[in-house]
Each structure stands twice: as structure tokens, then as C-alpha cells.
Image (spheres, coloured by chain):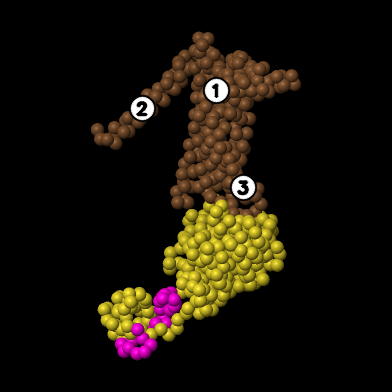
Amino acid sequence: MAIEARNVSKRFGDFTALDDVSVDVESGSLTALLGPSGSGKSTLLRVIAGLETADEGAVFISGREATALAPQKRGVGFVFQHYAPFKHMTVWDNVAFGMQIRRRPKAEIRRRVDELLDLVQLGGLGGRYPAQLSGGQRQRMALARALAPEPDVLLLDEPFGALDARVRVELRRWLLRLHDEVHVTTIFVTHDQEEALELADSIVVMNEGRVEQVAPPRRLYDEPANEFVMSFVGPVNKLGDAWVRPHDIELGHEPNAETREVQIERIVRLGFETRVELVRDDGERLYAQLTRNEADELELERGDIVYVRTRAETTFSA
Amino acid sequence: MTARHAVRVGSLGYLALILLAPVGLVFWRAFEHGPRPFWAAISNPEASHALRLTLEIAVVAVPLNTVFGVLCALAIVRHRIPGMGLVNAIVDLPMALSPVVVGLSLYLLYGTQGWFGPWLTAHGHRILFAYPGMLLATIFVSLPFVVREVVPVLRELGMEQEEAAATLGASPFATFRRITLPAIRYAVAYGVVLTTARALGEFGAVAIVSGGIAGRTQTLTQYVQASYENFQQTNAYAASVLLAGLAILTLVAMTAFRPREDRRGNRSA
């Protein structure tokens, strides 16, 4: 295990940020801490980095107990949500900082900083100041800075949160490639389930200071451990006690023993996907996800009466 | 005349009438009979002693208040210690309190009837009517400036850069030297300028504890007052010009720091 948090609790006054949290992170993996705001995911990351101290519990990094270690002795690289660039230093000096502090030879620093700037596609921008960079460039500078002292672990707090949608998608792909190249154990915090599903080998779902489930993306989606995970990861309809994914809803014009009558309230065409919003005779609302071809073949119109069948549904025993 | 003109004429007229005219008049009176009487006035032993004493006090008071001012500001902003709100309020005390009261309170502490006075006198230390008392009074009245300049900048700066430095391996001292200090340096410099101006110009508190003995415990401000009262107007005006000159120097230093700070502000916006 590269990182292990064992029974960690942390309170801020009356607020319990972490409640007996245990998490194992495998060496070389890319792990997501996923949860709504206030779920404790950022606090857990900061406890691992040593920026907060746990009230109870222990933290191990690379097999070494780190619970009481100062952040500078933990061998972690941390990328802050707003990147925390050193504003009065050039990009080059920002990246060199961690190595200068460790008094590495000048030639080595020069070589590695240039190498890292190329790696994060900032070669040639070393002389600029952080304020002269775009958001995406600043975020890559922060990554290079965190990677420079060759940390055992890379921790990213909402790494894409402050970027606009297109840059975010680009950077996600780029981070994935970077992780394949550098292969440092990485944990990132996100509230965006799509981001977690796309990037992570393993997802830790958190809610109200507790871990709800730890699983690879596929299993998390197909076999959610409880109602919270079901509702938080992926789109879902709740019909009575049953949960149904919108892509598990089939529409047809002919009723049979398995179907139920619904009326089409709205049709939203989102490129390849068509979302059909429906209302049942008992007033319950649900929506179905169809491909464009499926929707076109059915010739659906607003106000039509159609019949739905669910391919799969999930119930959780209370 | 448009409203904008009215505002301009009004504000500049007010400044000229209230600030420039009296100060200008002092300059005019000092040089009324040419530079020679002016030089004679400021090179007489009492005047040059007063100047030296004033500078000797500032040279100790300003660095002390700078170092402790920065430490105080760090304590107020960075450490969640109970009672820090009270400290924050106490720092402002010298601003709120009349300097005369400050002088009087030192009197009560170090006077012959005071708490520490008898013990100190018995051990051969003289505080009142001597350099230490004048220094204490000056430190007291010029204490808040560095703290007040640095606190808002530290708040604005936040802790993220310092935390980032820590995760990169920097010790608390290295973090302060390489991250915090460069970020607050303009605020510190501006605070130093204000502290210096106050230390040079202080009158009330120092007047009470110094006794104003000519050639011994007389600062430049006291020299001005004493000369004026003794009908040695030329001396008073000349020393005033000297004080004003020092003030102008600090003002120039101040404007030298200000615009750079603004430029930085624009760039990081």
C-alpha cells in the first residue's frame, strides 16, 4: 500500500469532517476521492499531506507511519485547488523551489526543471510570472512544481474545479497520459462523478465524513453499495423503492404484461443522446436515455402516450 | 464651471490653504534672510544635538517596531490562539490614546514613586529624563503602523502559498523568508516609513518623560518648541525646516514604494 489512512477522525468545532475513515491506496494507482461538498474528501487529502492533523487515527505513507510528521517530511506533492502559485517567482523558479530547498546541485535542478516544463508543455514559458499564464497553464505549472522533488505520492485537490469546461476535458486526458508516463501514486479530490469515472482506477465515495464505498469505476456504477452511491454516481430514476438507470428504460408503442403507461412530457436532443422526460399515470416522473436512432425510429412526439419497460432495476434493503 | 472643476479646485484649494500655506510659510521664514542664518541656526550645538538624539531614538525604535510588528501581525493572522482578538485591539491603543497619556503612564511606572522606578534607581538605571524613557515613549506611540500595514496583506495572501512551500519541503523559517516576506515586503516597507515619520515627529509623549533639557534630552520637536518660546524664531524655523525635510524624505520613500505595489496589484489581478 502506498497510502493508508486508518480510522481517521477530524472535527472542526462542532462539525465532524471525518468520521472513522479508513482508506487504502495502492502503489502506482490513480484514485479519486468523490463526494459532495462537505463530505470530508478535501480534509482527508489534507490529513494525508499533513496540512491538517487528525484528531484520531493514523496515516501511513509508503509503509512508514506519517501521522505526526510535518508536511515537509512526508514526501508528498500537493496541487491546490487554486494552484497556490508563488506569485513573486517566475514559472521556472516555482518549479525549482522544492529542489532548491533540498539543496540539489544547480546543474541537476536546471536539467530537471527544463525537463518538467517540457513534460507539462510549458517549455519556453519559464521566464513568465504566474499571473501571465492562463488557468490551464497555471495548473500544469503547479503539477510540475509538485512533481519536481520526486514525491512518493501526488495529491490533487479539485484539480480541474477552477477551469472552464473545454480546458477541463483536455487537461483530464493530459493528466491520464502524464500518469501513464510518470506513474506516481496519485489521489485526486473531485465532486464530479464523470471526472472520477473517466480518470480513476479506484474511486472512494465519501459522504458526511464517511466512506460509502471503494471500488473501481465499473463496479461502482454497476453494483453500488447503497442508495447514496446509486444516486451520486451516474444518472438514475427513483420509482418507489426501486432505482432505474435512464438507459435501462425501454419505450414502445404496444403495451404488454411488463409495461406501464406513460406520457411524454418533453424531448431533449443532446447530439447522440436523446433524453425523453416522462410522467406516469400516478404522477411519478422519470426519464429515459435513448440513442438518436432509437428515438427517431419510435417517432416520439411530445404528449404521446407510450409504454415503458425497465431492463434492470435495483433495490436496497433498508 | 463644471462640477468636476469645482471638486478639483475645492480639494486642491483646501490642501493648499490647510497644508501647504503654513508649511510653506515656515520655509519662507527660515530662509527669509538667506541661507547663512539658516546654517548658523541648525549648526549650533543644541540644534545638532537635538537632531542627533532624534535620529538615535528613531534608529532603535523603528527596527524594533518592524521586527515585532511583523511577528505580531503573523500571530494575529496565522495563529488561532484564544485572546488574539484582544491583542489585535491592544495594538491600536497608541492610535487611540493621546500621547500625553502615554507619557504620563510611563511616568507612573518609572517615576520615583512608580512601580519600577525605585528599584531601577537603586540599581543605577535612569529611565525618565534620559534616553531610555524617550525611547520607550517613541516605541509606544509608533508601534501600530507596521502591524496595521501587514495584517491586511497577510489576510489577503492566505495560507495556500505557505502550505504549498511546506509540502515542497520548506521549513517554517525558509517558508517565511522565501514566500511570506517577499509577499508582504511592500507593506512592511510602507509601515517602516510611517513608523519613521511618527518616531521623528513625536512630541507629546516624549516631552513628558524627557524633561527637555537643552543639549541633553531635547529632541528636534522639543527644540523647536523651546526656541520659539525663547523668542529665537530663526532657530525654531530652521529646525522646523529640518523636521519638514526629514518628513519630505520619508514621503518620497513612501511614494517610491506605493506605485510598485499598485503595479503588482494590477498584474496579479
- In this rendering, the label closer to the viewer, 2 or 1: 1
Regarding mark 3 in the picture, which secondary structure is present there? Answer: helix
Give the residues in magenta: A235-260
**Could you confirm whether marks 2 and 3 are on the same chain?**
yes
Q: Which residue is mark 3?
A: B176
Which chain: brown?
Answer: B
Q: Secondary structure at mark 1?
A: helix
* Up-down relation of residue B71 to residue A185 (above or below): above
Mark 2 or mark 1, which has the lower sequence index?
Answer: 2
Q: Residue furthest left?
A: B1
Confirm whether residue A228 shows in the render.
yes
Residue B204 in picture, x, y percent from top left: 54, 21
Is residue B101 on the magenta stretch?
no
Q: Is residue A251 magenta?
A: yes
Give, as a three-letter code, the residue at label 1: Val
| Label 1 environment density (alpha carbons within 10 Å; few <14, some 14–19, many ≥20) | some
Decide if residue A111 is in sight here.
Answer: no
Relative to B35, is B153 above or below?
A: below
Per the image, label 2 sits on a secondary structure element best described as helix
Pick whichever, A296 or A128, lies toward us.
Answer: A296
As drawn, the residue found furthest toward the top would be B231
Q: What chain is tagged by disc 1?
A: B
On residue B14, which mark appears? Answer: 2
Q: Which chain gets the yellow colouring?
A: A
> Which residue is depicted at the point 61% across and 60% down?
A9
Whether pointer 3 and pointer 1 mark residues with C-beta atoms closer than 8 Å, the reply is no
Asked whether A306 or B243 is in front, the reply is: A306
Q: Badge 2: few (under 14), some or many (20 or more) residues near its Cα, within 10 Å?
A: few
